[in-house]
Amino acid sequence: MIFGNTKCRRAQAQFDAYVDGELKDRAWLESHVAACQACRSRLEQVQAMALGLDGLVRQAPPEGFAERVMAAVSEQRTQVAYRPPRFRPAFGLAFAATTTLLIFAFFSFRMLTRPAQVTPTATTAASVTAQELRADAAEYESRGNIAEALHAYHQADELENTASLDTARAYEKAGFAGEAAYRYAEIAFY
Ligand SMILES: [Zn+2]
């Protein structure tokens, strides 16, 4: 979770720039992190994430990927008149199966293509927490607990929702069509 006090928020807002080596005033952040266990462990997670992302091979989305996703999304939207508050099996087997396939396709694809430097800094803290939820979700998924996995993915999505549109636009602008399509689909679903 994002820690309540102003210094922690200020510190966590600087994590991306710090990890990227772009933060000018490193001394303030380093002294805060030295004194604050919560921010220290959060920064370690951001650093670990950045290292992991650097190790991934960046690749272009398959041809027509974004278009297929958006077509599937608008088809879903015309079929579903209201927004389900959360995943429910009773909502309809066909809808659930299609949604599940789409979500897992997005996540699998995303692991391969997620660009490291596009997300706006303001979304960092929410993204880190969402990342934790996604890790939980992956854990559930690996144990075959699909309903819990979807629920955790959904919570992560909700957390990022306010920033999602800006992020989608940033990805689109930077030429990551697959990632942008994922973000737009996220907004369309939730
Ligand atoms: Zn702190």
Image (cartoon, rainbow, N blue to C red):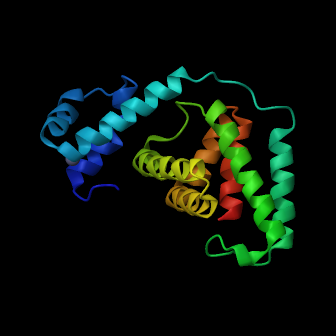
The image shows a total of numbered marks equal to 0
**To which quarter of the image does residue 110 belong?**
top right
Name of the residue lying farthest toward the front? 143
Q: Is residue 80 above or below residue 117?
A: below
Answer above or below: position of 167 versus 44: below
Q: How far from the left and from the top, in percent, is residue 153? A: 57, 56
Locate the N terminus by quadrant: bottom left
Q: Which sits in the foreground, 142 or 153?
A: 142
Tell me the quarter of the image containing the C terminus: bottom right
- Left or right of residue 15, residue 40 in this image: left
State the image coordinates of residue 61 (x, y, percent, origin top left). Answer: 76, 32
Q: Quadrant of residue 85?
A: bottom right
Q: Nearer the viewer, residue 111 or 169?
A: 111
Q: Could you tell me which residue is drawn at 73 percent across and 57 percent down?
A: 100
Residue under the image location 39 percent in, 48 percent down: 125
Residue 87 lies, in percent from the top left, at: 65, 70
Q: Quadrant of residue 44?
A: top left
Q: Is 76 situated above or below 25?
A: below
Q: Is residue 172 visible?
A: no
Q: Is residue 121 above or below residue 189?
A: above
Q: Tell me residue 27's x, y (percent).
A: 18, 28
Q: Is residue 142 left or right of residue 7?
A: right
In this picture, residue 173 sits left or right of residue 162: right
Is any part of residue 75 visible from this angle? yes
Q: Is residue 44 left or right of residue 5?
A: right
